[in-house]
Image (spheres, rainbow, N blue to C red):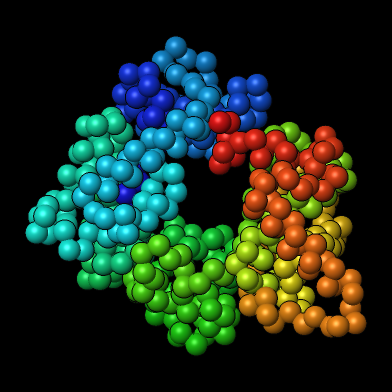
């Protein structure tokens, strides 16, 4: 099963304040001092009565006596998440629990029938226990594999509280889904590519020739095809996709960045993070994507462009070089508010060709490994680039947060 704590941050704050998150309009906001700060969680009444949801901005919240606003208490949220995991551990061994995020977990209920009864009853009892002990409502999706459980949760249970999908449900519940980005694992760019191929529903995707998808998307095409049939052979704890297909990072800036050098500072910091994660996975990539959204004050818009290089890389400055080329080519000299970067078309870093005569490449690789080691041992701020200490840098501030939020 896949279990999700409903509006987790808001529910935690409601518990502290003795409020009912299903009755009181509650919003948890990143920082009261920043009018553009993002709403991290909103209770159902907040969404229904005032149209405020996760991702809304502080300045969009109306002044109303019924509304309760809170700043996040991330340390408390983590403690609550761990306590909920401990409660689930009373029903299944730790090996059967995969914590997917602070408010969502996969749980393998196989073999618990003799102890707790049928899996559906066990799942509902876990839900009731969490609500009774922590006053936090949850939603549960059940299925024959991780993917189906996740789809049952996202597409069904988040509306009803509980849903169970079987393979027999795929044609009537999964295939009608449109737009394609409603399905877990399909982003807007992939959706556009599929639409250009004449694929508009998950059913269309399921009926598309596998080789056609693989020719167009590579390994991701194989994944898309099998997921459209509800097939996922990943063991508990493995990524839902069969193998990591990209590494990416997105960031909403706390103010408009109007200066090119300021924007490039953040891009460099993000390239550093992506390169580190790629190296840690022993991977290297050839396609680098840069997305930039402009401020609403500048009437929005933006661009999302990718470039494929000849040789795979996990070197920070090589990734940054490609991002800078894309930035210089497509940036429209308007204030930026959101940046996203990813590296894909991954392969083993052993495929990187290191010439004995290319001293610079050897030095860069050694430098990257050394920086990774120091950060792993002494913390993410043990070694930073000089730009991170400028006013435009965000790495220092983000390092002081947990999950991007205040401790």
Identify which residue is drawn at 83% across, 66% down: 364
Q: In which quadrant of the rendered view does residue 311 lie? A: bottom right
Q: Is residue 350 left or right of residue 74?
A: right
Q: Is residue 339 left or right of residue 193?
A: right
**In this picture, is 264 found above or below 56?**
below
Please provide percent x and percent y for residue 166. Answer: 23, 66
Please provide percent x and percent y for residue 56. Answer: 55, 34
Q: Is residue 298 visible?
A: no
The front one of 389 and 340 is: 389
**In this picture, is 145 found above or below 137?**
below
The front one of 69 and 189 is: 69
Q: Is residue 165 left or right of residue 247?
A: left
- Quarter of the image that includes the N terminus: bottom left
- Quarter of the image that includes the C terminus: top right
The front one of 228 and 138 is: 138
Q: In which quadrant of the rendered view does residue 337 lie? A: top right
Residue that protrudes farthest toward the top in the picture: 65
**In this picture, is 400 found above or below 264?**
above
Identify which residue is drawn at 66% across, 40% down: 399
Identify which residue is drawn at 26% across, 37% down: 130
Q: Is residue 357 left or right of residue 214?
A: right
Please provide percent x and percent y for residue 26. Answer: 42, 25
Residue that protrudes farthest toward the front in the picture: 377
Identify which residue is drawn at 67% across, 76% down: 349
- Number of numbered tags placed on the structure image: 0
Q: In which quadrant of the rendered view does residue 57 lie? A: top right
């Amino acid at each position: 099963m896949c279990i999700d704590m409903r509006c987790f941050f808001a529910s935690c704050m409601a518990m502290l304040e003795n409020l009912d998150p299903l009755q009181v309009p509650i919003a948890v906001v990143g920082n009261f001092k920043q009018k553009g700060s993002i709403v991290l969680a909103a209770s159902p009444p907040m969404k229904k009565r005032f149209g405020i949801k996760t991702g809304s901005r502080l300045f969009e919240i109306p002044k109303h006596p019924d509304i309760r606003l809170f700043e996040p208490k991330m340390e408390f949220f983590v403690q609550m998440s761990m306590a909920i995991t401990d409660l689930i551990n009373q029903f299944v061994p730790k090996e059967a629990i995969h914590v997917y995020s602070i408010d969502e977990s996969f749980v393998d209920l196989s073999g618990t029938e003799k102890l707790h009864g049928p899996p559906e009853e066990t799942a509902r009892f876990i839900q009731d226990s969490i609500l009774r002990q922590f006053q936090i409502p949850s939603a549960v999706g059940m299925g024959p594999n991780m993917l189906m459980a996740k789809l049952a949760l996202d597409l069904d249970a988040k509306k009803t509280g509980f849903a169970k999908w079987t393979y027999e449900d795929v044609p009537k519940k999964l295939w009608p889904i449109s737009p394609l980005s409603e399905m877990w694992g399909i982003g807007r760019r992939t959706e556009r590519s599929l639409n250009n191929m004449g694929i508009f529903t998950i059913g269309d995707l399921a009926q598309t020739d596998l080789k056609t998808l693989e020719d167009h998307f590579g390994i991701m095409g194989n994944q898309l095809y099998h997921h459209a049939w509800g097939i996922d052979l990943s063991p508990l704890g493995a990524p839902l996709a069969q193998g990591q297909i990209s590494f990416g990072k997105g960031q909403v800036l706390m103010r408009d960045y109007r200066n090119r050098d300021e924007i490039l500072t953040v891009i460099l910091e993000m390239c550093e993070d992506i390169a580190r994660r790629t190296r840690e996975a022993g991977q290297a990539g050839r396609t680098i994507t840069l997305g930039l959204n402009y401020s609403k004050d500048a009437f929005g818009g933006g661009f999302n462009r990718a470039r494929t290089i000849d040789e795979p890389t996990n070197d920070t400055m090589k990734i940054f070089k490609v991002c800078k080329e894309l930035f210089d080519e497509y940036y429209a000299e308007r204030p930026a508010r959101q940046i996203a970067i990813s590296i894909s078309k991954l392969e083993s870093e052993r495929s990187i060709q290191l010439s004995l005569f290319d001293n610079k490449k050897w030095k860069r690789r050694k430098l990257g490994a050394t920086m990774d080691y120091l950060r792993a041992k002494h913390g993410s701020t043990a070694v930073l680039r000089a730009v991170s200490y400028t006013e435009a840098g965000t790495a220092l501030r983000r390092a002081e947060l947990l999950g991007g939020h205040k401790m």
